[in-house]
Image (cartoon, grey):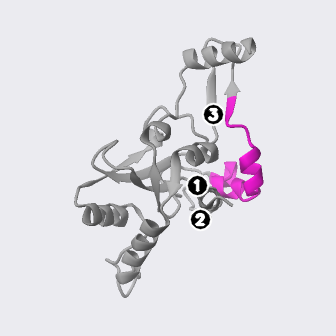
C-alpha cells in the first residue's frame, strides 16, 4: 500500500476533539464524518464535484484526499526527527508548561532551527480554495524555496481549531497550490468534457 495514501487517510480520520464553542455539534466535524469512510472510499470518491453548472457562477469542490496524494510524498524520516525533537522537551501542563507540542508554535520553532531560515505558516482558508477541507502548512524559504512542508489538516468544524498533528511531506508546489478553479475555468472544463 502506498505509504503517503495511508498517512493522509490517517490524518483525515484523526480525532481532533470537541470544544463547547465549536459548532460541530450542529453540523458534525470533519473527523467524525471521515471516520465513517475507508481508505478505499477516499480512493473512489470523485476528484471534483461541480455545483451550479447551469448558472453564470459555477463552482467546484476538490477532494482533499486526491489533492494531497497528487502533490505530496510522506517524509517519514523528517516526521520522525520532529517527533523525537518534541519528546526531548515534551509539554506537560504542570511539570513542563513551556515544553514542546505538535502544534503550530513548536513546528515553526523546529523548522527555523532545523533549516536555518524563518518558518512561515499558510492556511488555505485565507485563499480562494476549492479543497473539501482546509489545510495549514509550515515552510521555510518562501513558496518554492524548499520542497518540504509540515502539514496539518483541519478536522474540526470551526476553522479556528481542530487541526491534526503535523506530518512532514515533500511536495510539488505547482500541484499543491493548484486548488482553485474560477467560473471560466469550470465552464471551459465542462465544454471540453461535453465535446469528448
Q: 154 above or below 86?
A: above
Q: Marks 1 and 2: CB-CB under 8 Å?
A: yes
Q: Earlier in the sequence, mark 3 or mark 1?
A: 3
* Neighbour tally class for label 1: few under 14, some 14-19, many 20 plus, Cα within 10 Å: many
Residue placed under numbered mark 1 in the picture: 156
Q: Which residue is mark 2?
A: 17
Kind of element beneath mark 3: strand
The alpha-carbon separation of the residues under discs 3 and 1 comes to 18 Å
Query: For mark 2, does the 10 Å Cα neighbourhood hold few (<14), some (14 to 19), or many (20 or more) residues?
Result: some
Q: Position of residue 86 (x, y in %)?
A: 39, 76
Front position among marks 2 and 3: 3
Q: Which numbered circle lies on residue 61?
A: 3
Under circle 1, the secondary element is loop
Q: In the image, which residues are magenta? A: 24-49
Side of 159 where 139 appears, left or right: left
Q: Is residue 171 above or below residue 182?
A: below
Residue appearing at x 45%, y 72% in the figure: 80
Instruction: Specify whether residue 32 is painted magenta.
Output: yes
Splitting the image into 4 quarters, where does residue 100 fall? bottom left
Comes first in the chain, label 2 or label 3: 2
Task: Quote the CA–CA distance across marks 1 and 2.
Answer: 8 Å
**Residue plotted at (63% across, 62% down):** 10
Question: Residue 25 location, x and y as percent?
Answer: 67, 55
Residue 114 colored in magenta in the image: no
Vertical placement of 174 versus 30: above or below? above
Question: 2 or 43, which lies in front?
Answer: 2
User: In the image shown, does 59 or 69 lie closer to the viewer?
Assistant: 69
Check residue 97 in the rendering and tell me which mark sits there, or answer none. Answer: none
Q: Are marks 2 and 3 in contact (CB under 8 Å)?
A: no
Tell me which numbered mark, 1 or 2, is placed earlier along the sequence.
Answer: 2
Amino acid at each position: 500500500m502506498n505509504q503517503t495514501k495511508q498517512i493522509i487517510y490517517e490524518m483525515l480520520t484523526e480525532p481532533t476533539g470537541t470544544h463547547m464553542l465549536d459548532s460541530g455539534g450542529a453540523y458534525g466535524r470533519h473527523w467524525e464524518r471521515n471516520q465513517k469512510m475507508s481508505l478505499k472510499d477516499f480512493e473512489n470518491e470523485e476528484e471534483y464535484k461541480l455545483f451550479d453548472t447551469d448558472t453564470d457562477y459555477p463552482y467546484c469542490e476538490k477532494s482533499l484526499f486526491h489533492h494531497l496524494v497528487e502533490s505530496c510524498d510522506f517524509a517519514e524520516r523528517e516526521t520522525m526527527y520532529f517527533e523525537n525533537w518534541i519528546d526531548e522537551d515534551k509539554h506537560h501542563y504542570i511539570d513542563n508548561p513551556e515544553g514542546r507540542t505538535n502544534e503550530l508554535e513548536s513546528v515553526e520553532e523546529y523548522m527555523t532551527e532545523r533549516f536555518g531560515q524563518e518558518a512561515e505558516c499558510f492556511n488555505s482558508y485565507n485563499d480562494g480554495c476549492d479543497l473539501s477541507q482546509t489545510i495549514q502548512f509550515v515552510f521555510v524559504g518562501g513558496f518554492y524555496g524548499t520542497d518540504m512542508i509540515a502539514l496539518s489538516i483541519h478536522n474540526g468544524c470551526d476553522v479556528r481549531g481542530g487541526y491534526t498533528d503535523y506530518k512532514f511531506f515533500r511536495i510539488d508546489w505547482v500541484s499543491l497550490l493548484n486548488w482553485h478553479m474560477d467560473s471560466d475555468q469550470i465552464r471551459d472544463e465542462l465544454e471540453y468534457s461535453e465535446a469528448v
